[in-house]
């Protein structure tokens, strides 16, 4: 059985899960926020009274303070939940230079308070466990025929998930914008026919119930990584979420974006590294594979890699998929099209069926080799 240590999976729960009854474990996590550390750096000319005033504000919130003597300045350490100081404007007190949060602003996502790796159950498929997962399919659902054909190819190659955007966040308003609910119906039909699980992007708050009704995994695209209302909305469902990294997001911003989802009561988040903007123009993005190892270290949540958007070039997709396996990713998401030359979006980075099968053979070989040799450790803390 899938090992989801965060919470039981609620396949029937939907976005209307009552807010008043969040999953039991949420409260337990919130208590773990108490292990925060914050230091308040005093001015070099701060008086004893200034320091005493700072301490009394800290203690008034039920926290304790510890004064440390620096060479030039005194530093006041705060022990306890620093969020309680949020309304105290510590930085505005006389004699205060600035306050610095030492521990991370994300908690529920952090490995610090949850040392064991989480396995997310996506409609019966464990992500983040022993098995490497592959999601494959076209960038966009274009027609019933195109999608069903792609699904058959994805299945034959050994993927566990079918991808396909029904709501498309396109750079140009004149580009194909997606079939929306019609596209979701084709995805559901493809799931019926092949048994593949379905991942599809949700681009706006209003579309969450619709996408959640059809897809097994809700994709939050790079352009929406900091759409906080959207993050909260998917956080109110119990559907697993695939959270892509923003175009120019730091790891800290990305992990905090996931925190929004967990904080609403949905523990089922999977990260997806999809490349970031750099000065390089040959590739569409710069695929940051070091993020895989870093996120594994910082968080207990699984992470997969998207080498299609990460490079923008189909020739680079196979080598970067192999690199993702080697880096310790829990899976990959690939763009594959029955006929990339005719694709309505992202054709240049889409694999042909033949290239997809070739990639799958080698990815499977490498993943198996690493497993047999014990190279993949599910716990990289
Ligand atoms: C996509 O998966 O087709 C997509 C739009 O990805 P991203 O949000 O990473 O650009
Ligand atoms: Mn795409």
Image (spheres, rainbow, N blue to C red):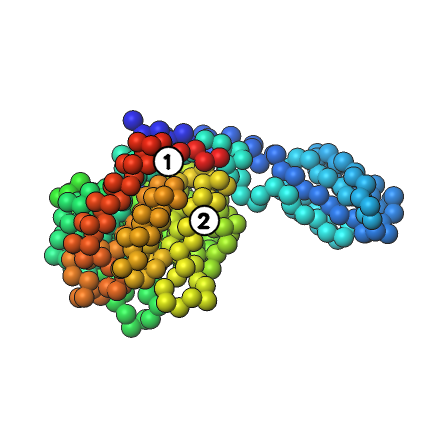
Measuring from the top left, give residue 292's x and y in whole percent.
42, 46
Residue assigned mark 2: 291
In which quadrant is the N terminus drawn? top left
User: Which secondary structure, mark 1?
Assistant: loop
Residue positioned most to the top: 1
Element carrying mark 2: helix
> From mark 2 to mark 1, how far is it between C-alphas?
16 Å
Query: Which quarter of the figure has residue 142?
Result: bottom left
Q: Position of residue 291 (x, y in %)?
A: 45, 49
Quick check: is the Cβ at mark 1 less than 8 Å away from ligand 1? Answer: no
- Relative side of 122 to 328, left or right: left
At horizontal 56% and vertical 32% (from top left) the residue drawn is 31
- Name the residue located 58 percent from the left edge and 43 percent from the top edge: 104
Precedes in sequence: disc 2 or disc 1: 2
Q: Name the side, left or right, on which 226 lies relative to 57.
A: left
Residue 257 versus residue 185: which sits nearer the camera?
257
Please report the residue visible at 44 percent of the width from the left and 62 percent of the height from the top. Answer: 277
């Amino acid at each position: 059985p899938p090992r989801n240590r965060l919470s039981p999976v609620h396949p029937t729960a939907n976005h209307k899960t009552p807010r008043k009854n969040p999953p039991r474990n949420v409260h337990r996590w919130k208590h773990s926020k108490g292990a925060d550390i914050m230091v308040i750096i005093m001015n070099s000319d701060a008086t004893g009274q200034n320091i005493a005033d700072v301490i009394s504000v800290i203690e008034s919130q039920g926290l304790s303070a510890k004064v440390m003597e620096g060479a030039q300045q005194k530093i006041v350490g705060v022990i306890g939940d620093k969020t309680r100081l949020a309304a105290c404007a510590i930085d505005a007190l006389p004699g205060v230079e600035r306050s610095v949060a030492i521990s991370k602003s994300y908690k529920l996502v952090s490995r610090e308070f949850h040392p064991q790796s989480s396995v997310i159950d996506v409609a019966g498929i464990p992500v983040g466990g022993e098995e490497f997962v592959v999601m494959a399919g076209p960038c966009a659902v274009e027609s019933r025929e195109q999608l069903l054909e792609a699904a058959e190819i994805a299945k034959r190659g050994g993927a566990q998930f079918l991808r396909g955007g029904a709501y498309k966040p396109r750079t140009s308003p004149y580009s194909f914008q997606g079939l929306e609910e019609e596209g979701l119906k084709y995805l559901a039909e493809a799931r019926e026919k092949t048994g593949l699980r379905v991942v599809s992007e949700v681009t706006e708050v209003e579309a969450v119930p619709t996408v959640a009704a059809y897809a097994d995994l809700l994709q939050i695209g790079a352009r929406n990584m900091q759409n906080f209302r959207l993050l909260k909305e998917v956080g109110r469902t119990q559907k697993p979420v695939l959270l892509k990294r923003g175009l120019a997001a730091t790891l800290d911003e990305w992990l905090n974006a996931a925190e929004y989802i967990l904080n609403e009561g949905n523990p089922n988040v999977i990260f997806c590294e999809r490349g970031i903007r750099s000065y390089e123009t040959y590739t569409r993005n710069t695929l940051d594979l070091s993020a895989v190892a870093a996120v594994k270290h910082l968080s207990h949540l699984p992470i997969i890699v998207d080498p299609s958007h990460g490079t923008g070039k189909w020739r680079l997709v196979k080598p970067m998929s192999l690199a993702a396996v080697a880096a310790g990713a829990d899976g990959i998401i690939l763009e594959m099209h029955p006929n990339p030359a005719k694709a309505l979006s992202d054709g240049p980075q889409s694999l042909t069926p033949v290239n997809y099968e070739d990639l799958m053979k080698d990815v499977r070989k490498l993943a198996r080799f690493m497993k047999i040799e014990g190279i993949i450790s599910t716990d990289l803390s």
